[in-house]
Image (spheres, grey):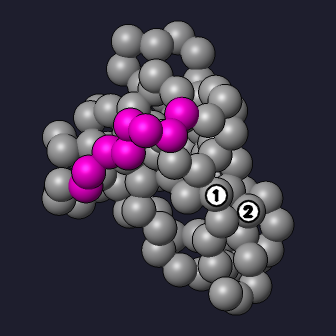
Amino acid sequence: MDKPIMRASSSVVERDAAHTPALTQPGREVAGSRVRFPLTAVRGTSIEGLAPPGSRIQTGADMVVVGHDGRVVLRTPDSTGDWTLQVHRPGHQRTLPIRIHVLADE
């Protein structure tokens, strides 16, 4: 049986257009993509990111659909190390990988 698709909550978060890292570099906004996630996070906590509305974010076994405001809140894994999100943006054939380094604590 397929897992249900989770819907992201709604709220407004400002974009930081001044910083434009390389296409697959996590962190602030990925250049020209309207996708933004932190570089690091603490295991077992929530992180907030931005992606175009309607994007689907694969977080391992789960799929989250980004709400109309582009805001998404995800729970980090309980294990440490690199965590890769796959962002499927509407109108794009290529999936955008985002790598977040998960830490034991701050």
Query: In the rendered view, would you say 76 is above or below 86?
Result: below
| First along the sequence among labels 2 and 1 | 1
From the image, tell me which residue sits under label 2.
101
Snapshot quadrant of residue 44: bottom right
In terms of secondary structure, where does tag 1 sit? loop
| Residue 102 place in picture, x, y as percent | 72, 69
Residue mark closest to the camera, 2 vs 1: 1
Check residue 18 for magenta coloring.
yes
Magenta part, dominant SS: loop
Kind of residue at disc 1: Leu
Asked if the residue at tag 1 contacts the one at tag 2, i.e. Cβ–Cβ closer than 8 Å, the answer is yes
Give the residue at mark 1: 39
Residue 53, located in which quarter of the rendered image?
top left
Residue 4 visible in image: no
User: Where does the image place residue 104, in percent across and percent down from the top left?
Assistant: 75, 85
Q: Which residues are magenta?
A: 13-20
Position of residue 65 relative to residue 74, above or below, is: above
Total residue callouts: 2
